Amino acid sequence: MKLFDPTADPIPRAVTLAPRPRELRGLRVALVENTKFNSAALLERIGARLAREHGMQVVQMHRKRSPSHGVTEESADTLRRIADFVVSGIGD
């Protein structure tokens, strides 16, 4: 059994962020829904708002098997091909 001390200081690490687009208009966004209650509804509203306010195109709502499962490699490859970026949502 491993025990973790929640009072320990975090270990800093370098993180490289993806470059931000200059403009959102015309970009394609895919949504990843995790099956939690309200996740699909939340993502639909986010997608509609991105389309309405920023001229984006929602290209797919992908549904994961469960909240604890990751996106499969096959699904990740598809998302890379069809979208400029992905919004992954939770619910509850």
Image (spheres, grey):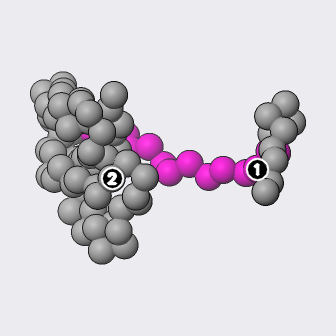
Quarter placement of the N terminus:
bottom right
Is residue 18 found left or right of 35 in the rendered image? right
Task: Give the SS element for disc 1.
Answer: loop
- First to last magenta residue range: 11-24
Residue drawn at (31%, 46%), measured in percent from left and top?
34
| CA–CA distance in space, label 1 to label 2 | 29 Å
- Looking at the rendered structure, which numbered label has been put on residue 13? 1
Task: Give the SS element for disc 2.
Answer: loop
Q: Position of residue 40 (x, y in %)?
A: 20, 38
Residue 71 magenta-drawn?
A: no
Q: Position of residue 36 (x, y in %)?
A: 30, 39
Amino acid type at circle 1 is Arg
Tell me if mark 2 has few (under 14), some (14-19) or many (20+) residues whose alpha carbon lies within 10 angstroms of its own.
Answer: few
The residue nearer to you, when weighing 80 against 20, is 80
Q: Position of residue 6 (x, y in %)?
A: 79, 34
- Looking at the rendered structure, which numbered label has been put on residue 27? none
Q: Which residue is mark 2?
A: 66
Number of marks in picture: 2
Residue 21 magenta-drawn?
A: yes
The residue nearer to you, when weighing 36 against 18, is 36
Q: Main secondary structure of the magenta part?
A: loop
**In terms of sequence position, does the residue under pointer 1 or pointer 2 come before the other?**
1
Relative vertical location of residue 74 with respect to residue 41 in this rendering, above or below: below
The residue nearer to you, when weighing 82 against 35, is 35
Residue at the limit of the structure toward the bottom, as seen here: 74
